[in-house]
């Protein structure tokens, strides 16, 4: 008790340095905040999002995304009008997971053991995903006005092959119907 009284008189008489007083005040405030946070209970971990609304994650979403993007871009090419795009996908998106690889070389044989790397989050183990690969594109059909001219058709094919990274033989460009003619 005597020590406490002498500490209080030392504090009140101004014998403590100002920086020391501020440090003590900040330390006390920090301890108070930590004590209050413990009173509110354990913090619930945020729920993992299964799917992101803006993300493209189904085959139909990928197809629609490709078609919309291509239609917008191709309509901006000089001489091209009324663009319709159809994209055929060869596969769906693929998720690539990290692997733990253990290999050993013996005198007569060598072994290689691969297992998917897992990360533990509490009681739940989940695989470590490295990347998500876009689906492979089987073919693209573009129907557009103005593509009956060879130069315009060439520009359309070049744009599609560069945007999607598909070879030329997977892109078909057909001229669209003219305004009022049948």
Image (cartoon, grey):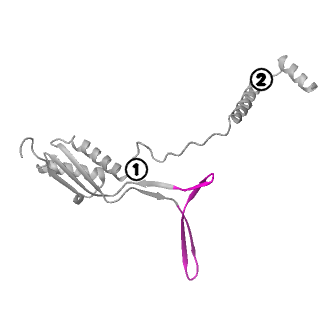
Residue 126: percent from the left, percent from the top?
A: 55, 55
Q: Nearer the viewer, residue 165 or 60?
A: 60
Q: Quadrant of residue 125?
A: bottom right
Q: Which residue is mark 1?
A: 57
**Mark-to-mark CA distance, 2 and 1:** 57 Å
Residue lying furthest right in this view? 2
Mark 1 nearby-residue class (10 Å; few <14, some 14–19, many ≥20)? some
Label at residue 122 = none
Q: Nearer the viewer, residue 77 or 135?
A: 135
Q: Earlier in the sequence, mark 2 or mark 1?
A: 2
Residue 158: percent from the left, percent from the top?
A: 23, 51
Q: Nearer the viewer, residue 20 or 60?
A: 60
SS of the residue at dot 1? loop
Q: Residue at x 30, y 54 (%)?
A: 165
Magenta stretch: give its range: 99-128
Whether residue 5 sits left or right of residue 77 in the image: it is right
Residue lying furthest top in this view? 13
Q: Which residue is mark 2?
A: 21
From this view, report whether residue 127 is shown above or below residue 176: below
Name the image quarter holding the N terminus: top right
Residue lying furthest left in this view? 181
Q: Nearer the viewer, residue 28 or 38?
A: 38
């Amino acid at each position: 008790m005597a020590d406490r009284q002498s500490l209080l008189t030392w504090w009140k008489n101004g014998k403590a340095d100002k920086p020391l007083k501020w440090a003590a005040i900040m330390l006390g405030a920090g301890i108070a905040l930590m004590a209050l946070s413990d009173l509110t209970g354990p913090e619930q971990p945020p729920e993992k999002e299964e799917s992101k609304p803006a993300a493209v994650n189904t085959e139909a979403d990928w197809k629609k995304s490709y078609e919309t993007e291509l239609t917008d871009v191709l309509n901006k090419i000089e001489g091209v009008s009324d663009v319709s795009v159809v994209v055929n996908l060869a596969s769906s998106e693929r998720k690539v997971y990290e692997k733990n690889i253990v290999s050993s070389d013996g005198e007569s044989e060598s072994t290689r053991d691969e297992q998917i790397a897992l990360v533990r989050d509490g009681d739940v183990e989940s695989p470590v995903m490295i990347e998500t690969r876009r689906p492979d594109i089987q073919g693209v059909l573009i129907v557009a006005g103005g593509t009956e001219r060879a130069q315009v058709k060439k520009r359309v094919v070049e744009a599609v092959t560069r945007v999607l990274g598909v070879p030329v033989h997977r892109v078909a460009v057909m001229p669209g119907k003219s305004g009022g003619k049948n």
